[in-house]
Image (cartoon, rainbow, N blue to C red):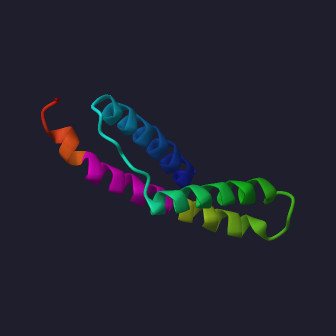
Amino acid sequence: LIPAIAILLREVFVSGLREYLGNRSIEVPVTLLAKWKTTTQLVALALVMAAPMLLGLAFISHVALWIAGILTIWTGWEYLRSAWPHLAGPEL
């Protein structure tokens, strides 16, 4: 449950950040790690959905979900750090 909440909050945060900075004509480029994060999220989701059907997959799905959650927090922090100068300064 904790990784899922982290994933949801980060997605809302980054979407809002992109929208806010986009209105100020500031681009927030996608990082390679963020692309890996998305891939990990999708694999974890597939594993979580398949876990009830395949014995022994529950543990692997939990590990994948936690890895996706950790990558989510990491990339969210990176986006916040890169956008901070634009958030702290006066609006143009």
Magenta span: chief secondary structure: helix
- Can you say whether 15 is above or below 91 in the image? below
- The location of residue 19, given as percent across then percent down, is 38, 32
Instruction: Please give the name of the residue rendered at 76% of the width and 53% of the height, measured from the top-left corner.
Output: 49
Left or right of 48? Residue 75 is left
- The location of residue 53, given as percent across then percent down, is 87, 59
Left or right of 13? Residue 21 is left
- The location of residue 24, given as percent across then percent down, is 27, 31
Instruction: Please give the name of the residue rendered at 74% of the width and 64% of the height, measured from the top-left corner.
Output: 58
Instruction: Please give the name of the residue rendered at 48% of the width and 57% of the height, measured from the top-left corner.
Output: 34
Q: Which residues are magenta?
A: 69-83
- Can you say whether 83 is above or below 57 in the image? above
- The location of residue 86, given as percent across then percent down, is 21, 41
The image quarter containing residue 50 is bottom right
Left or right of 28? Residue 45 is right
The image quarter containing residue 63 is bottom right
